[in-house]
Amino acid sequence: MNDRNGHCFPRLWKRHRRVSLSLILRLLVGASAALTVSVLLVLIGYIMIKGIPNLSAQLFAVEYTTQNVSLLPALVNTVLITFLSLLIAVPIGIFSAIYLVEYAKKGNKLVAVVRLTAETLSGIPSIVYGLFGLLFFVTKLGWGYSVLAGSFTLAIMVLPIVFQTAEESLKAVPDTYREASFGLGAGKLRTVFRIVLPSAAPGILSGIILSVGRIVGESAALIYTAGTVAEMSNGLFSSGRTLAVHMYALTSEGLYVKQAYATAVVLLVMVMGMNALSAYAAKKVSKG
């Protein structure tokens, strides 16, 4: 049956159904985004409300005691372990991605093995990394509970994140960039490091940001490798707890729960600051 304008009712019904489905999907996407933001805001608000009133000058004393429960030694250890872990993982992850994307031949079995290895490593629980670090770095190599053992363990943990994000970022660079560079007489190495790598830098930095967040928030692996000594590390082979381990220790003892909330505030601000700094660096690199 046709209407007055000659259009078919089945066609109008299909069009109405398509519009309705599109509207439903748009509402679902919007609701999901709003729920995600709401969870984040509630989490941040809860930590701030519980932690900010408990911040005091004693928490930032140079030496830890049972009276001040200072978090400053843990903060310094966190920065040191984060720096060492990235120093180990970032070059290996980026250079591996460059080899697979730019130099490895298509159909190479090594490429499939490396990608499978990265996917497997990314799915291993952190406690397993901690046990591996305890058996290999702490016991087998004789490093003991140390910053170095914790840094190497975390470097292995975040290596898949750096590698996978770097690989996807390099793949996203258009082939026309490479062809134009070759057409101007540039070699393979110069093209990769002067054209391709700067273009992929924002995506690579995003992977580094994710790695920083996992390193700073990790506790299970560090308990078995870096230890729980509440002192500022005086060397690579000395033990020291990070902020996450410090917060876990305070909570498990049950005597310093308020100070644990204050530590959570400092940890949250630290992560947000690192993310903002990395995002700013990514914008500068992309504009350059």
Image (cartoon, rainbow, N blue to C red):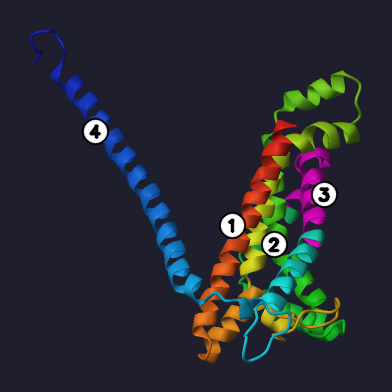
Mark 3 crowd level (few <14, some 14–19, many ≥20, 10 Å Cα): some
Question: Reading the chain from its start, which is encountered first: label 2 or label 1?
Answer: 2
The residue carrying mark 2 is: 158
Give the Cα separation between the discs numbered 1 and 3: 28 Å
Give the Cα separation between the discs numbered 4 and 3: 48 Å
Question: In the image, is residue 14 part of the stretch drawn in magenta?
Answer: no
Mark 4 crowd level (few <14, some 14–19, many ≥20, 10 Å Cα): few
- Residue ID at (76%, 49%): 111
For residue 156, say whether it is visible: yes
Q: In this view, does 193 lie above or below 217?
A: above
The magenta segment is: 88-112
Q: What residue type is labelled 2?
A: Val
Q: What secondary structure is marked by label 2?
A: helix
Check the picture and name the quadrant holding the N terminus: top left
Q: Which amino acid does label 1 sit on?
A: Met
The residue carrying mark 3 is: 95
Q: What secondary structure is marked by label 4?
A: helix
Q: How many numbered callouts? A: 4
Q: Residue 20 carries which label?
A: 4
Q: Residue 272 carries which label?
A: 1
